[in-house]
């Protein structure tokens, strides 16, 4: 799953989103417990972009990212449930259903926050499952 996002433009939206969806790190921390999470980001007006890779809540890499030139943040989640064989087995038996749940969740976030651009990719098939453009209004 690959979810690029743009930066928030209104402080009120930023504060509400942090409380509502855990964009201040709680969601990423939870994901990093059960998967490999890669975060690549570049702030507007800054010369460098940065990359952090976390697996099992341990930082595998933190440093300057030479690959990213565009402003924004991309979060990639791989090897979901790698350390939880029971959950992984259940997910493998219903991959399409799990993928549908993920797509539905990302779509709900996109509808609530039109100021964020989201893209959901299936890394196995390389299909783009969902893409939303930045919008100043719903």
Image (cartoon, rainbow, N blue to C red):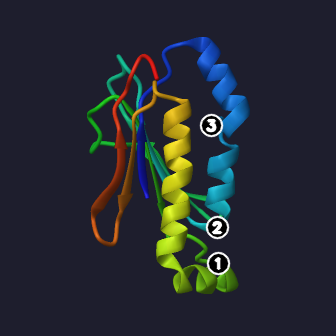
User: CA separation, marks 1 and 2?
Assistant: 6 Å
User: CA separation, marks 1 and 3?
Assistant: 24 Å
Q: Where on the picture, by quarter, is residue 117?
A: top left
Whether the residues at callouts 1 and 3 have beta carbons within 8 Å, the answer is: no
On screen, residue 56 above or below 72: below
Badge 3 or badge 2: first in the primary sequence: 3
The residue under the point 69% across, 85% down is 86
Whether the residues at callouts 3 and 2 have beta carbons within 8 Å, the answer is: no
Q: Which residue is mark 2?
A: 34
Q: Position of residue 85 (x, y in %)?
A: 65, 85
* Residue 8 placement, left or right of 47: right
The residue under the point 53% across, 59% down is 102
How would you rate the neighbour count of disc 3 (Cα within 10 Å): few for under 14, some for 14-19, many for 20 or more?
some
User: CA separation, marks 3 and 2?
Assistant: 18 Å
Q: Position of residue 40 (x, y in %)?
A: 42, 43
Looking at the image, is mark 1 or mark 3 nearer the viewer? 3
Q: Where on the picture, by quarter, is residue 32?
A: bottom right
Whether the residues at callouts 1 and 2 have beta carbons within 8 Å, the answer is: yes
How would you rate the neighbour count of disc 2 (Cα within 10 Å): few for under 14, some for 14-19, many for 20 or more?
some
The residue under the point 71% across, 34% down is 20
For label 2, the SS is helix
For label 1, the SS is loop
Residue 37 visible? The answer is no
On screen, residue 80 above or below 41: below
Badge 1 or badge 2: first in the primary sequence: 2
Q: Closest to the observer: 19 or 72?
A: 19
Q: Position of residue 124 (x, y in %)?
A: 33, 72
Instruction: In the rendered structure, find residue 39 and report the number of the disc placed on it.
Output: none
Instruction: In the rendered structure, find residue 83 and report the number of the disc placed on it.
Output: 1
Instruction: In the rendered structure, find residue 23 and report the number of the disc placed on it.
Output: 3
Badge 1 or badge 3: first in the primary sequence: 3
């Amino acid at each position: 799953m690959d979810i690029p996002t743009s930066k928030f433009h209104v402080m009120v939206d930023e504060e509400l989103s942090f409380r509502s969806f855990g964009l201040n790190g709680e969601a990423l921390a939870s994901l990093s417990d059960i998967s490999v999470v890669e975060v690549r980001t570049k702030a507007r007006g800054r010369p460098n972009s940065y990359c952090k890779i976390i697996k099992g809540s341990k930082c595998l890499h933190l440093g300057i990212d030479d690959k990213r030139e565009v402003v924004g943040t991309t979060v990639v989640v791989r090897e979901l449930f790698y350390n939880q064989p029971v959950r992984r087995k259940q997910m493998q038996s219903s991959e399409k259903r799990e993928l549908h749940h993920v797509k539905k969740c990302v779509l709900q976030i996109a509808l609530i926050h039109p100021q964020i651009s989201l893209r959901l990719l299936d890394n196995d098939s390389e299909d783009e499952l969902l893409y939303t453009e930045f919008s100043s209004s719903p």
